[in-house]
Image: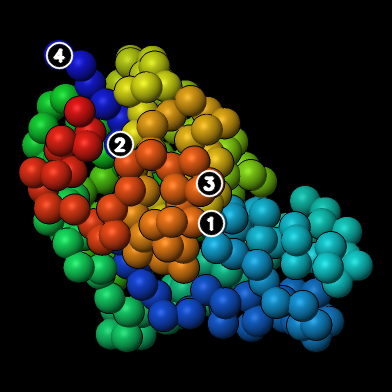
Amino acid sequence: MDEHLVLWDVDHTLIDSLGLGGAAYRQIFPEVTGQPVREPALMDGRTDLGTIDQMLRSHDIEPTGELVAAMTAALAGVFDEVRAELAEKGRVLPGAREALATFDGDPAVHQSVLTGNTAEVARIKLGAFGLLGHFDLDIGAFGDDHLLRGGLVPVARGRAARKLGIDFAPERIVLIGDTLNDVRAAHESGARLIAVATGSYSADELRAAGAEVIFETLPAPGELRAALG
C-alpha cells in the first residue's frame, strides 16, 4: 500500500478569514514595538515568521528572538479574542469539507496542514469552523517553524517520520494550496502540488509559476482522489 502525506494550506484554500490576519498585524505591531505601522504586513503565502521578519525590517527594527516571540504570542492572543467573530464572519470555502472528508478514514492517507499560520493560530482558525477533526496536527508544519515556506516541508516530513515511523519520499508528499509560495515550496522540496485558484492567484499565474495540477475551485472528491494518484 502506497501511503501519502497530504498537507493542506489553510487560508484561501480551506477558509476565508475576511482580512482578519492583516487587521491583527495592524493591531499588534504598535502594541509590541511602540511604533506606528508605516508599512503593511505582507502575507499571501508567507509564514508568520517571514511576515514578522519583513514587517520589523521594513520599520528598521532588528527582528530579535525576543521581539519575534512577543509578536507571535500577541498574534495568537488577537485570534483567540476574535474566534467568535471569525466563525461568524469568515467562511469555509465551497467544497472544503467534502474535500477533507475524502481522505478521512483512509489508512493510506495521512492528512495534516502546511500553513503560514503559527501553530496556535492554525488551531484557532480550524477550530472555529469545526475542521480540526480532519487533521493530525502532530505531523504538520506551521508558520512559526521556519522563516520560509519551503522550509516547512522537511519539518512535516520529519514529524511524520517520528510519529508514524514512515519516511515519506518527496513524491509521496502532496501539498494542496493556492499561492505562488506553495508552488515554490513544492519545487524546493520535491513534493507534489495540487494547486487551487481559490485565492489571489489565477490558474494561469499558478501554471506560469510551475504548477502542473490546477483546479479553479476545490475539486469534487473523485477528482481530488484521482489527482492524488
- Residue located at (16% from left, 25% from top): 108
- Frontmost residue, 223 versus 54: 223
Q: In the displayed structure, does residue 114 sit left or right of residue 218?
A: right
Name the kind of residue labelled 2 in the image.
Val
Residue at image mark 1:
45
- Residue located at (15% from left, 14% from top): 1
Residue at image mark 3:
209
Mark sitting earlier along the chain (2/3): 2
Name the kind of residue labelled 1 in the image.
Gly
Q: In the displayed structure, does residue 102 sit left or right of residue 161?
A: left
- Residue located at (46% from left, 52% from top): 206
Mark sitting earlier along the chain (3/1): 1
Asked if labels 1 and 3 touch by Cβ distance under 8 angstroms, the answer is no
Mark 3 vs mark 1, CA separation in Å: 14 Å
Label 4: state its secondary structure: loop
Q: Please name which of the two marks, 2 or 3, marks the residue nearer to the observer.
A: 3
Q: Please name which of the two marks, 3 or 4, marks the residue nearer to the observer.
A: 3
Residue at image mark 2:
6
Mark sitting earlier along the chain (1/4): 4
Picture layout, residue 86 above or below residue 133? below
Name the kind of residue labelled 4 in the image.
Met
Residue 184: % across, % down: 55, 41
- Most extreme residue toward the right, as rendered? 60
Mark 2 vs mark 3, CA separation in Å: 21 Å
Name the kind of residue labelled 3 in the image.
Ala
Residue at image mark 4:
1
